[in-house]
Amino acid sequence: MPPANDGRGDGCEAVGTVIAVHQGMRPAQAGRWDETNVTIVSDNAETLDGLETYLQRAGVTTRSTRNIARAVELTSTFASAVVIFPDDFGPAAVADALTNLGAQRPKTLVVLVTCAPKRFARESQTLRATMLVVPRPAWGWTILDAIRDHLARNRAP
């Protein structure tokens, strides 16, 4: 049975993002992720569980929530990234969270995993947050590689 449209009118279906968890996962680089901290925000339990499991197996400390209003609260000031699945939430709640993250966690990478990447690419121009837009579906290693690349580029000499 195909998934039902969720009624937001954005053409996205209300389904979880499949996160690959299997024996062939890329291992975390030794000694590189001791301080890595990532917050995951999704209203889909399957998405939260899958990505959290993948990242934890890769040695990443995670926090997760189904409440987008708690994104800043759960994202520590030293967090590497916050991964948000904005299609799970209303536009106003997403805009508020992105504005708050940009103001209160400007050095934290905001990774948006969405079926509407063009919309968020435009919005990223007006926010102070460091933002990466990843089209759905996204695999755990794609998200982790984006976070690693961001850390490598922004590492102090």
Image (tube, rainbow, N blue to C red):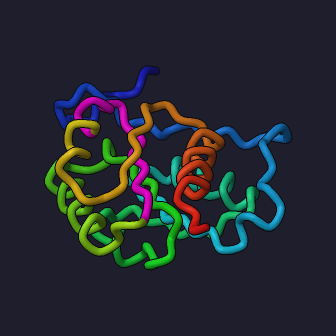
Q: Is residue 51 left or right of residue 3?
A: right
Residue 124 is at least partly visible in this image: yes
Residue 124 rendering spot, x and y as whole percentages: 25, 46
Q: Is residue 135 left or right of residue 18?
A: left
Check the image and report above or below for 55 versus 18.
below
Q: Residue at x 42, y 41 (%)?
A: 113
Q: Quadrant of the C terminus?
A: bottom right
Q: Which residue is outermost to the front?
A: 157
Asked if the stretch drawn in magenta spans residue 36, the answer is no
Count how many numbered circles sit on residues in the image: 0
Residue 5 rendering spot, x and y as whole percentages: 29, 29
Check the image and report above or below for 119 versus 47.
above
Q: Residue at x 74, y 64 (%)?
A: 32
Q: Bounds of the magenta span?
A: 108-120
Q: Which residue is outermost to the top?
A: 1
Check the image and report above or below for 55 versus 10.
below
Residue 50 is at least partly visible in this image: no
Q: Quadrant of residue 36?
A: bottom right
Asked if the stretch drawn in magenta spans residue 109, the answer is yes
Q: Is residue 35 left or right of residue 83?
A: right
Q: Is residue 41 left or right of residue 17?
A: left
Q: Residue at x 54, y 64 (%)?
A: 38
